[in-house]
Image (spheres, rainbow, N blue to C red):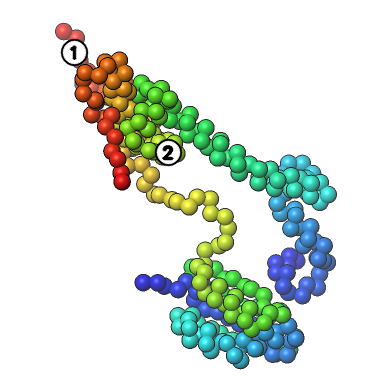
Amino acid sequence: RYVRQLQRLQLLFSPSAADARGARQFVEEAAQDFARQHPDVVLYVSPHSGPGPAPVLRAEYLNGTVREELIASKTSEEIVQLATKLANQSGLDIIRIRKPFHTDNPSVQGQWHPLTNKPSILTVQGPRLQPQ
Amino acid sequence: MVVLSAARWVRSRLSDRFWRVQEVLKYARHFRGRKNRCYKLAVKSVRRAFVRSTKARREKKRFLRALWITRIEAASLEHGLKYPAFISNLLKSQVELNRKVLADLAIYEPKTFKSLAALAQRRRQEGFLAALGDGKEPEGIFSRIVHHH
């Protein structure tokens, strides 16, 4: 069963700043639909009064990563798209994956070492033969 | 005071130029000499490094294939077969394993590789018999070809 990795989305904006207009429109129109479509994500809307830091959408994931995205001067539709993108992501950091595969047990028959294909007289110590 | 987030309105001497310069210098940090500190030298070096990394992606494939071939050759010589004989006889017995997989088997599954070498050797012997014996004896067991339709 699918478990959504996004825990909560915090919408931090100021109600009077000019670049937070898209955020305000999003809160008025599209936030409720978004919250209904994604029932396992908690959406917090926290307006802070007066001029302050730029409007930001903060996403927190189940593995603890916090991702902040600027929403200054973005339209409501763009914020909806951003929010859905964050909701579909997992919290793993976005770096280059070196290999698309990984095993904990790479070798089933025993890894090769220089004595694998040599006659066993070199490795096995049998009982010492008594001189007769 | 180190300011970590560029979004905040910064009341310090770190101007936009600082961030623009850092964007380039962050890719030059592991270089040798003054190119890891001085912007003018770093720009040239970082650009060459990127160009070389894009060109090297085509050569990485060649390099890895050569590495696999070396490893398969070493492993098959341990079992008494040379590389061309091994590969050609495996293909004739319809075992279409690529060199990457064969190299991994040779390292992590030596018994499987030994059985593959034995198969190639047997097919080789049957090939010799078919070529030199001329016709009266029936075809070897491992020389039979399976047709998938």
Residue B105 is situated, as x and y percent measured from the top left of the image, at 38, 37
Residue B131 as seen in the image, left or right of residue B53: left
* Residue A64 visible in rendering: no
Residue A94 seen in the figure:
yes
Q: Residue at x 43, y 25 (%)?
A: B84
* Quadrant of the rendering where the N terminus of chain A is positioned: bottom left
Of B13 and A59, which appears nearest the observer?
A59
Residue at the image position 53 percent from the left and 84 percent from the top: A34
Q: Is residue A57 left or right of residue A63?
A: right
**In this rendering, would B40 be left or right of B32?**
right
Question: Which is more toward the observer, A123 or B24?
Answer: B24
In depth, the one of B115 and A69 nearer the eye is B115
Please identify the residue farthest to the bottom as the structure is shown: A28
Quadrant of the rendering where the C terminus of chain A is positioned: top left
Say what secondary structure mark 2 lies in: loop
* Tag 1 residue: A130
Which residue is depicted at the point 64% across and 83% down?
A76
Which residue is at 51% across, 35% downward? B65
Q: Chain of mark 1?
A: A
Residue A92, percent across and down? Answer: 52, 63
Residue A45 - label: none
The image shows residue B92 at horizontal and vertical percentages of 35, 31
Query: Mark 2 sits on what residue?
Result: B98
* Badge count: 2
Q: Is residue B30 above or below residue A96?
A: above
Residue type pointed to by label 2: Asn
Q: Secondary structure at mark 1?
A: loop
Name the front one of labels 1 and 2: 2
Q: Residue furthest front?
A: B135
